[in-house]
Amino acid sequence: MKYYIIVGEASGDLHASRLMRSLKSVDAEADFRFFGGDLMLAVGGTRVKHYRELAYMGFVPVLLHLRTIFSNMAFCKRDIVAWRPDVVILVDYPGFNLGIAKYVRAHTDIPVYYYISPKIWAWKEYRIKNIKRDVDEMFSILPFEISFYEGKHNYPIHYVGNPTADEVADFLAGYSDTFDGFCKANSLPADRPVIALLAGSRRQEIKDNLPAMLEAASRYADKYQLVVAGAPSIPHDYYDKFTEGYEVSVVYDQTYPLLAHSRAALVTSGTATLETALFGVPQIVCYETPIPKVIAFLRRHLIKVRFISLVNLIAGREVVPELVADTFTVDNIVNELGRLLPDGVARARMLDGYAEVKRLIGRKGAPDNAAEAMLRLLRSECGNHQESL
């Protein structure tokens, strides 16, 4: 089978590369052509463009690069038609990918599969019309999306399990370093437990969240050491302006080992909240927003979901505290940390909630499950097509 895959950011590159490996394991003739990154290229196939040529975040950058964005989209459409894949697989990145899906549906008979749904349950729910019209099969990695798509919108999907859960489980199964060994490898003192600070992977997120995280966590610096998980795409000296004056360390490409040895964590919303929960580290979700009172109003009246962290969304209740918009203050962070350190009822209750999240995630082997389902569907479609001839 010929697979045309489109991702638009680093996380998509990771998840798509693992899906590609799984597809190769069930389809010896798998041939890949893709918009993607270095991880996908390492698996094999032809990279048409790097995702960095697509990834513009925020209103102003998108506006400034509209010509490039439209040019890339037009090129992608032409390339799909010229290559004639057996399927187009889209990975998240809805602004670009839903435009491609619309074109493919309107101008070809190539099936469109979506791996990792856009978060339309949180924002832009109207996109469900486009998905129902243009996407043949949706492969979901979040269990609560079943009720959203199938229950609310009568659109059947495939829940395949969560790849982040697989990645954490695989890491823990092969990781044996001690706390002393981790500290020695990263030039950290081994005399105090760790409070991990996961402030995001983009400059703006770090700028918005890390200062308050540091100020709050520093009040516990007499008993705990503060360690920032440095984002791999951020220059090391970018953190200096925020860490100056604090007793804090920054480690790079060590997020999983860091979480494996942390006593508590302050985490910016995103996949990191789920990773932290799967490592069993009590956490506080911290997310600074512009004009916080307005955002707080929008959360109450317009935004479709009650929570912003994957942990709480999966559980359907508040397992971890979310300090967002008008509740994102240094004092609130300090107070919540005090409830988790060193032990106590709040900590135990959160760990019980983590166990519930793991149970709800359920199925293991998300990329394998998705690959097997995709190939089964494609072979069925090919068989039906042959019978109709």
Image (cartoon, grey):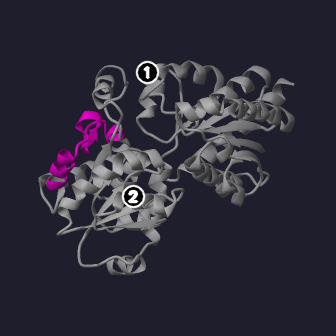
Q: Earlier in the sequence, mark 2 or mark 1?
A: 1
Neighbor class of circle 1 (other Cα within 10 Å; few <14, some 14-19, many 20+) is: few
Horizontal side, residue 330 vs residue 261: left or right: left
Question: Range of the magenta residues?
Answer: 312-338
State the SS at label 1. helix
> Which numbered disc covers residue 237?
none
Residue at image point 70% right, 60% down: 42
Quadrant where the N terminus lies? top right
Position in image of residue 155 (x %, y %): 53, 23
Type of amino acid at the residue the image marks with label 1 = Lys
Residue 279 in picture, x, y percent from top left:
35, 60
Q: Is residue 173 above or below residue 347?
A: below
Image quadrant in which you'd find residue 92: top right
Above-or-below relation of 106 to 363:
above
Residue 318 belongs to magenta span: yes
Whether residue 387 is situated above or below residue 268 in the rendered picture: above
**Closer to us: mark 2 or mark 1?**
2
Q: What residue type is disc 2 on? A: Lys
Give the labeled residue for mark 1. 152
> Who's the residue at 71% across and 34% down the image?
68
- Residue at image mark 2: 241
